[in-house]
Image (cartoon, grey):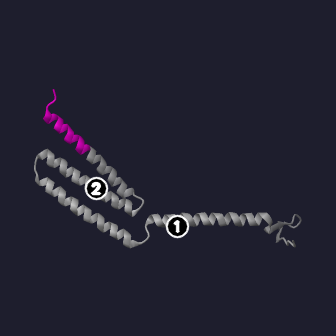
Amino acid sequence: MISVAAIFDHAVTLALGILSLSFLVTIYRIVKGPTLPDRILGLDMLVAIAIGFIAVIGIKTGYTLYVDVAIALGLVGFLATVAFARFVLSRGKTEDDIIAEAREAVSVARREAKAAAKARSGGGLEVRPEAGKTSERQDNE
């Protein structure tokens, strides 16, 4: 039969493994994140993962001092997140806004190009077969 201490050790090892994996995934998101708010959210997640590490190690060792450290880190992490949020709001446009404006400009340019191509093919230019030159067609209608 498995003892309680062995189950406890396995649970602590599993928790540290899951926290390590989530730490790596969060680091990837911070590095790869397409926008600044994504990176800020990743940093906030890193604080939560660090609190998890501290809590698991505190449970494993039995020191209650780790709980105080985790609470202090939680408060500092919250203040950092609020500061980053104020920074993003003071910047004005975010990268998402810029990307949306660029996409809108591209779609407007495509519509204008299609309209111009339609106007040229529909009656703007006429090709003379004998000379091979183009000239504007005069419609007297």
Q: Residue at x 21, y 62 (%)?
A: 75
Label at residue 11: none
User: Does the magenta run of residues contain 6?
Assistant: yes
Q: Residue furthest right?
A: 130
Q: Residue placed at 68% from the left, 63% from the top?
A: 114
Residue 42 in percent (x, y) is at: 33, 57
Give the secondary structure at mark 1. Answer: helix
- In the image, residue 1 sits, relative to residue 82, either above or below, namely above
Q: In which quadrant will I find the N terminus?
A: top left
Q: Quadrant of residue 39?
A: bottom left
Describe residue 81's horizontal placement relative to residue 132 as left or right: left
* Main secondary structure along the magenta-highlighted residues: helix
Q: In this view, does 94 lie to the left or right of 102?
A: left
Residue 99, percent across and down?
49, 64
Q: What stretch is highlighted in magenta?
A: 1-17
Horizontally, residue 88 falls left or right of residue 119, namely left
Say which residue label 2 marks. 46
Write the residue at 10% across / 50% down: 63
Q: Amino acid under label 1?
A: Glu
Say whether disc 2 or disc 1 marks the residue closer to the N-terminus: 2
3D distance between C-alphas at marks 2 and 1? 32 Å
Left or right relative to 70: residue 32: right
Q: In terms of secondary structure, where does tag 2 sit?
A: helix
> In the rendered structure, does residue 122 fall within the stretch colored magenta?
no
Residue kind at label 2, given as amino acid type: Leu
Q: Which mark is residue 101?
A: 1
Percent x, y for residue 93?
A: 44, 70
Local packing at callout 2 (Cα closer than 10 Å; few below 14, some 14-19, many 20+) is some
